[in-house]
């Protein structure tokens, strides 16, 4: 199965990709990260949805963050958000909190899917 698996969408009927991501917080930034994510800016929420994001969930274990994103087209979403005026300041803020800054230059496809209960 591809890392960018296509699944049927429950809301639109269009297929979407489900991708898992891993990021890591800088030491001591755990609480601040959660505070920042308690309410994301409305313009960022709108930009994510306009870029085709259906859901984006984040789990934290210590400094490790695990994301599951359901999106119509992951690479297109990244291209759309790269220079988006709502995303640029958000990414600058995330760069203060994360070990590795996301500069949107890569062709990452997330964490490799190893197994799935069909």
Image (tube, grey):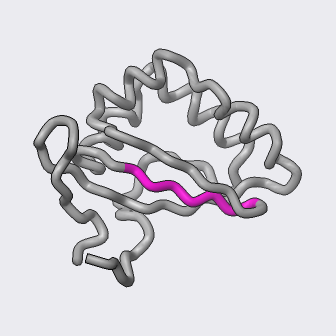
Query: If the image is split into quadrants, where does the C terminus sit?
Result: bottom left
Query: 64 or 14: nearer the eye?
Result: 14
Left or right of 26 in this view: 65: left
What residue is shown at x 45% (from left), y 24% (from top)?
Answer: 45
Q: Which residue range is magenta in the image? A: 63-69
Looking at the image, which residue is at 50% across and 47% down? 57
- Front in this rendered view, residue 101 or 3: 3
Q: Position of residue 49 (x, y in %)?
A: 33, 29
Specify whether residue 34 is painted magenta.
no
Q: Main secondary structure of the magenta part?
A: strand
Whether residue 29 sits left or right of residue 17 in the image: it is right
* Magenta-colored stretch includes residue 68: yes
Taking the view exactly as shown, the residue that stands out farthest to the left is 13
Residue 89 image point, x, y percent: 58, 25
Residue 10 pos. (x, y %): 21, 44
Closer to the camera, 118 or 6? 118
Quadrant of res 7:
bottom left
- Give the residue furthest to the bottom: 114
Q: Is residue 75 above or below residue 3?
A: above
Q: Residue furthest right?
A: 28
Q: Is residue 26 left or right of residue 65?
A: right
Answer with the quarter of the image where residue 112 lies. Answer: bottom left
Residue 5, x across and y down, in percent: 24, 65
Q: Residue at x 38, y 24 (%)?
A: 47
| Quadrant in the picture for residue 115 | bottom left
Residue at the (22%, 77%) spot, across then down: 1
Give the number of marks. 0
């Amino acid at each position: 199965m591809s890392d960018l698996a296509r699944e049927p969408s429950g809301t639109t009927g269009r297929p979407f990709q489900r991708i898992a991501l891993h990021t890591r917080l800088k030491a001591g930034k755990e609480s601040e990260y959660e505070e920042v994510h308690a309410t994301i800016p409305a313009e960022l929420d709108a930009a994510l949805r306009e870029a085709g994001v259906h859901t984006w969930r984040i789990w934290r274990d210590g400094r490790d963050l695990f994301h599951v994103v359901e999106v119509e087209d992951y690479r297109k979403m990244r291209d759309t958000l790269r220079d988006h005026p709502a995303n640029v300041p958000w990414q600058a803020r995330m760069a203060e909190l994360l070990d590795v800054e996301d500069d949107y230059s890569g062709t990452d496809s997330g964490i490799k899917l190893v197994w799935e209960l069909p």
